[in-house]
Image (tube, rainbow, N blue to C red):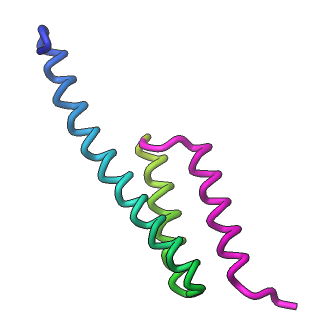
Amino acid sequence: MPNSPSATKRLRSDARKRSFNQLVLSEIKTLKKKLKASIESKNIEESKVTAKTLITKLDKGVKKGTLPRTKVDRLKSRIQISINKLTPANS
C-alpha cells in the first residue's frame, strides 16, 4: 500500500491509464485479426475499410502515448504493402 497521498493518487491514476491502454490495444489486436482474415479471403473492399480503421486507431494510440511511433510506422507500412499486393496493378 502507498504511504503518501500522492502515491495513493498515482496508484488510482495508473489503474485508469492501464485500463484505457488495454482497451486500445485490444481494439487494435481485433482489427489486425479482422484485416488478416479479409486479406486471406482476398476481399479487397473489406480489407481497405478495415485497414483505414486500423491505421486511425494506431495513430490515436500514438497520440495518447499507448504505442511507440516507430512501431506504428512499421505496422502502417506493412498494412499498406499487403493492401497494395491485394489490389490489381493498373497497367
- Give the percent coordinates (x, y) of residue 22: 31, 47
Horizontal relation, residue 3 to residue 24: left or right: left
How many numbered marks appear?
0
Residue under the point 51% across and 84% down: 46
Q: Is residue 83 magenta?
A: yes
Front residue of 39/20: it is: 39
Above or below, comparing residue 66 to residue 80 in the picture: above
Q: Quadrant of residue 75?
A: bottom right
Query: Relative to 51, is 24 on the left or the right?
Result: left
- Quarter holding the N terminus is top left
Say above or below: 79 vs 41.
Answer: above
Determine whether 37 is above or below 25 in the image: below
Viewer-side residue, 56 vs 21: 21
Residue drawn where x is 48% and y is 47% of the image: 62
Q: In the displayed image of the protein, which residue is found farthest to the bottom?
A: 91
- Which image quadrant: the C terminus? bottom right
Q: Is residue 87 left or right of residue 60?
A: right
Residue 60 image offset from top left, x and y in percent: 44, 54
The answer to whether residue 91 is above or below residue 58 is below
Residue 5: percent from left, percent from top? 11, 14
The magenta region covers 66-91
Q: Which residue is farthest right?
A: 91
Q: Residue at x 43, y 67 (%)?
A: 31
* Magenta stretch, overall SS: helix
Can you name the residue that lies furthest to the top here? 3
Q: Residue 26: where, in percent of width, then height?
A: 35, 56
Is 31 left or right of 8, judged from the image as shown? right
